[in-house]
Each structure stands twice: as C-alpha cells, then as structure tokens.
C-alpha cells in the first residue's frame, strides 16, 4: 500500500457537484430517506477513470486506472491509498479516509467529523464515543484524528463515517 495525491484525471471533470440517493425498503413502500453530498463529477460517469497521482514517499508520478473512480469520489487534489500491478500502474485506488472529530452528539453515539480527503463535514456513528477516547475540536483543541469507512446511512441516505479507528492508537 502506498499513499499519494491525484494530480490529473482522464475525464472531463467539472469539479464538485451534488450527488443524490434515495433509499426504498425492499418490496416497495415509501422511501426511508434521501440525501446528497458533494462529489467529484465528470463525463462519462460509471466508467473507468484514468489519470496520474504523485506518490507521497518518493514524489514519483504514477499512472492509475480505477473502475468507477468518479463514483468513489476520486478527483484532482484528493489524498488516496493505492496498490500497483506488476507493470507499475496503480489499479486499486481509493480515498484515504482520514478525519478530525468536530462534534460528539449528546447521546454519545456519533457526531460530525471533517473528512480530510474531500473537505466535507459528515456524520459519524460510533457507540461510546467519549469512552473510546474521542475528543471534539474546539477552544483551541484539535479533534481526535481518525481513519474511517463511509456508508450511506439507511436513516437519511447521507454519507456516514463508521468503523472509526483512532490514528496512532
């Protein structure tokens, strides 16, 4: 695994736009939620994204190819984790999900974090936040830095960070 920053893409990226989703229960019925968030866009969506990234450790420029890269949120300037094939091309590229805790809700089962890859503030869900050592940002204190995975919440269809891991812990 290596880390880098997306430098160019082969799509006609148009920047950040809203992406929406609506969740409907199996078998039909009224939607249980809908929501949206900013995500890199380009044409054509749904196809393999190609481009270059710069390796953080060596500074080398590496070609990449990633199916559904636009849908993964890959865009110029994003921090990524990648793996390379035997020919040196990065063929498994994903956002480096790092964040900083911004708030913890009063029920101690979530809050918000700043996603460092995209710059978006998103919800997170985690039981026993304070007992796990999470500290929100504020009053000159930086929030706890975490790694996380992102899902679409079944409650409101918004991107939600889960499976938080305190960095360095």
Image: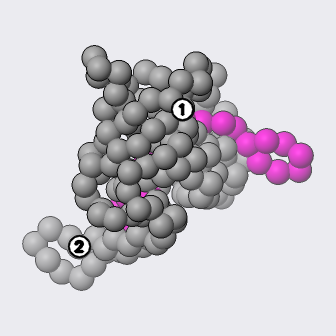
> If the image is split into quadrants, where does the C terminus sit?
top right
Magenta-drawn stretch contains 93: no
Q: Residues within 10 Å of mark 2 (few under 14, many from 20)?
A: some
Q: Quadrant of residue 94?
A: top left
How far across and how far down the image is residue 140, in percent? 89, 46
Left of 101 or right of it: where is 28?
left
The residue closer to the viewer here, 62 or 129, is 62
Residues at marks 1 and 2, CA–CA distance in whole angstroms: 40 Å
What number is the disc on residue 74?
A: none
Left/right of residue 92 with respect to residue 96 in the rendered view: left
Relative image position of residue 51 (x, y in whole percent): 41, 43
Classified by dominant secondary structure, the portion drawn in magenta counts as loop
Specify the segment rendered in magenta. Answer: 137-159
Mark 1, residue position: 54
> Residue 24 has which mark?
2
Label 1 with label 2: CB-CB less than 8 Å: no
């Amino acid at each position: 695994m290596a880390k880098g920053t997306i430098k160019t893409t082969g799509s006609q990226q148009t920047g950040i736009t809203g992406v929406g989703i609506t969740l409907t229960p199996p078998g039909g019925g009224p939607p249980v939620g809908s929501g949206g968030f900013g995500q890199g866009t380009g044409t054509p969506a749904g196809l393999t994204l190609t481009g270059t990234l710069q390796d953080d450790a060596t500074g080398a420029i590496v070609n990449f190819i990633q199916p559904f890269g636009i849908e993964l949120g890959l865009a110029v300037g994003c921090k990524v984790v990648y793996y390379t094939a035997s020919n040196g091309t990065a063929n498994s590229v994903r956002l480096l999900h790092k964040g900083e805790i911004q708030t913890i809700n009063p029920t101690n089962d979530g809050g918000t974090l700043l996603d460092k890859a995209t710059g978006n503030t998103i919800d997170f869900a985690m039981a026993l936040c304070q007992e796990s050592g999470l500290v929100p940002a504020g009053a000159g204190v930086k929030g706890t830095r975490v790694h996380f995975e992102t899902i679409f919440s079944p409650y409101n269809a918004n991107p939600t960070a889960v499976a938080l891991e305190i960095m360095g812990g």
